[in-house]
Image: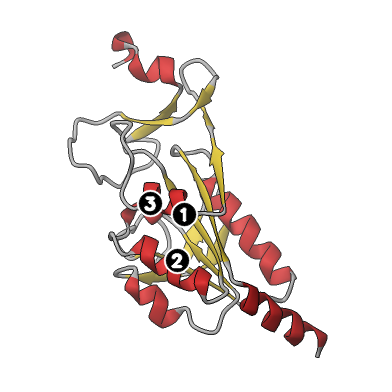
Amino acid sequence: MFIEDVFKRRNELGGSIEVVCGSMFSGKTEELIRRLNRAKIARLKVEIFSPKADTRYEENALVSHSSISIPSTPVENASSILLLGSDVHVIGIDEAQFFDAELPDVCNILANKGVRVIVAGLDMDFKGRPFGPMPAIMAMAESVTKLHAVCVRCGSPALYSYRLVPDENKIMLGEKESYEPRCRICYNDPELK
């Protein structure tokens, strides 16, 4: 009976929005999976969502670059999360930059209903500009954790996702064959282009 009372009280007090952001290869998905596993250990009901458009790994699992995984549900759009994520305590959302503009509102609705929402995604695109709905979610979040990869050129903390292939589309799915993490200096160095 005690656990139900705690959950009820938590829902009465309101939820929260947490953001894990950074460049590619910075460990965002790994950190999201870590937080979600901790919630499961605490016996909280957890649901995890990812954009259906991200087809790089398994269809029904979040998979980090280091092959750590957790089951997830792929969805077409942000509003689907409201339909599928009812009656839970924690919702994880991966690759948030690929979702539509409704995602910030969906996160806010869930948090206001008492749900802990954990969002992971790229904060900048390959041109170093804010990416998708991430800036709005970061602005309304209770906490933002910015992770850094290691610059493959000099070893400094990397905050940029440098695109190695000539493609100007804002969204291009890829891995190490298409992107590499770089620090500010190496990202902007014309000799490294």
Q: Do we see residue 60 in this rendering? A: no
**Which numbered circle lies on residue 42?**
none
Q: Which residue is mark 2?
A: 108
Q: Secondary structure at mark 1?
A: helix
Q: Which residue is mark 1?
A: 140
Does residue 46 sit above or below 70 in this rendering? below
* Mark 2 vs mark 1, CA separation in Å: 8 Å
Q: Do we see residue 173 in this rendering? A: yes
Q: Secondary structure at mark 3?
A: helix
Q: Are marks 2 and 1 in contact (CB under 8 Å)?
A: yes
Does residue 110 sit above or below 57 in this rendering? below
Q: Are marks 3 and 1 in contact (CB under 8 Å)?
A: yes
| Extreme residue in the front direction | 13
Question: Quarter of the image holding residue 5?
Answer: bottom right
* Mark 3 vs mark 2, CA separation in Å: 11 Å
Image position, residue 120 (x, y; %): 48, 53
Image position, residue 103 (x, y; %): 36, 63
Q: Amino acid at mark 3?
A: Ala
* Mark 3 vs mark 1, CA separation in Å: 7 Å
Does residue 184 sit above or below 12 in this rendering? above
**Which numbered circle lies on residue 136?**
3
